Amino acid sequence: MIKKLSMLALIVCGTLLVNMKSALADIINIKTDAPQTYVVKKGDTLWDISNLFLDQPWLWPELWRNNTQIENPHLIYPGDELRLRYIDGEPVIELVRDKTSISLTPDSSTKVKPSPIGVLPWKVLSPYIRNDRIMSAMAYNKLPHLLGDNDGVTAYVEKDFVLSHRLPDENAEYEIVRKEKALMDLNGELIGFQVRNVGRVEVMAGGGEQQIVRLVKSNSEARRGDKLSPIEEFDTSDLVLSAATDQVGVLIANIEERRLIGKRDVVVINLGSDEVSPGMVMGVYKQGPVIIDGEQPKYEVSRSKLKELLDLEERIEQPAFKIGELVVFKTFDNASYAWVTKSNKHMMGGEFVGKP
């Protein structure tokens, strides 16, 4: 007899086992050690501040719902003071804006308002936003590529002129990208290629099937065969925290190919833009090995089909226990990048991700 639980049921079961404090998703649990007041500092992130007050930081906007002072809880500035109080038993955050944080420009005629704090640490994540992406094999292989130059060299840097295939839109801005590695799912199926930005080009004259481009920025040496892709802009100001609901996926790997994954690592998950969006918070769950229940219970290591047919012992699949959390910050067609915000133990890839 074989006991089976669906992936979603395993994650739901794990969530209930790990966090029994909230029966409803929208109940706000203020931490017992939450400060009564907090002054926002330069370098703070919305996630960091939310984590000071809440066990579930993605519920941060709920703290503002009875507060008519602020329309957008994501627009908080260094110097602002946050005050925690209760209205009819409901926790509310009030904001006292620091007007002195507005400074003057050198000509002393224009007041400059500081930038709001980011939802996530964009200085840490910006290299992955600007320089990395995931593309399908078909989309990558269709891109035009660099052919060579009139000096016969094989590597190119800023100010070099290089011949390439004809570009689809001469008015668009292009970057040079190079395949770093193939990303595979747990079944060995190709998810896509992780590609990295090598530099930017300026489109010059061309004729027939070829085009001349000039390198205007180099992150590293460009090579013959490197691809040319239209530049994609990413607006971090639109990122709003939200909790995953019924999405279920798998953590594929650390983006830097380190074996162990922990807090503050950037990872790849196998859910694309049709399933998740930037700002979505997900729990990370680990499922233990299958248990063969008998007079002496044991873990399943490997079993042949014949042994499965003959073996009458009960095969029990364990529930998935929550071991961390992550926030999606960049999505692609078949995969996404996420920032690990909490980790109770090291991960190695293959863990499930779902409702936090």
Image (spheres, rainbow, N blue to C red):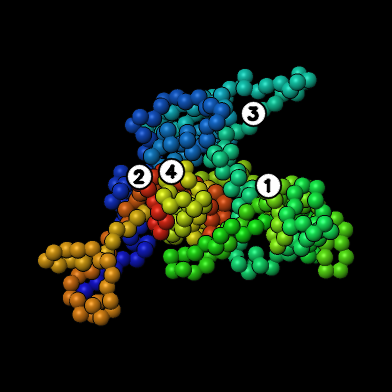
Q: Nearer the viewer, mark 1 or mark 3?
A: 1
Q: Can you identify the residue that label 4 sits on?
A: 263
Q: Residue at x 46, y 50 (%)?
A: 258
Q: Is residue 275 visible?
A: no
Q: Can you identify the residue that label 2 sits on?
A: 344
- What residue occupies the far left of the structure in this picture? 295
> What is the C-alpha distance between the residues marked 1 and 4?
27 Å
> What is the C-alpha distance between the residues marked 1 and 3?
30 Å
Q: Nearer the viewer, mark 2 or mark 3?
A: 2
> What is the C-alpha distance between the residues marked 4 and 3?
29 Å
Q: Are marks 1 and 4 in contact (CB under 8 Å)?
A: no
Residue type indicated by callout 1: Asn
Residue 134: percent from the left, percent from the top?
59, 58
Toward the viewer: 319 or 170?
170
- Which label belongs to residue 219? 1
Lower position in the chain sequence, tag 1 or tag 3: 3
Q: Nearer the viewer, mark 1 or mark 4?
A: 1
In this view, 91 is above or below 324:
above
Classed neighbour count for the residue bearing mark 3: other residues with Cα under 10 Å, few (<14), some (14–19), many (≥20): some
Q: Residue at x 37, y 61 (%)?
A: 8
Q: Can you identify the residue that label 3 sits on?
A: 114
Q: Residue at x 59, y 57 (%)?
A: 180
Q: Are marks 2 and 1 in contact (CB under 8 Å)?
A: no
Residue type indicated by callout 3: Pro
Q: Are marks 2 and 3 in contact (CB under 8 Å)?
A: no
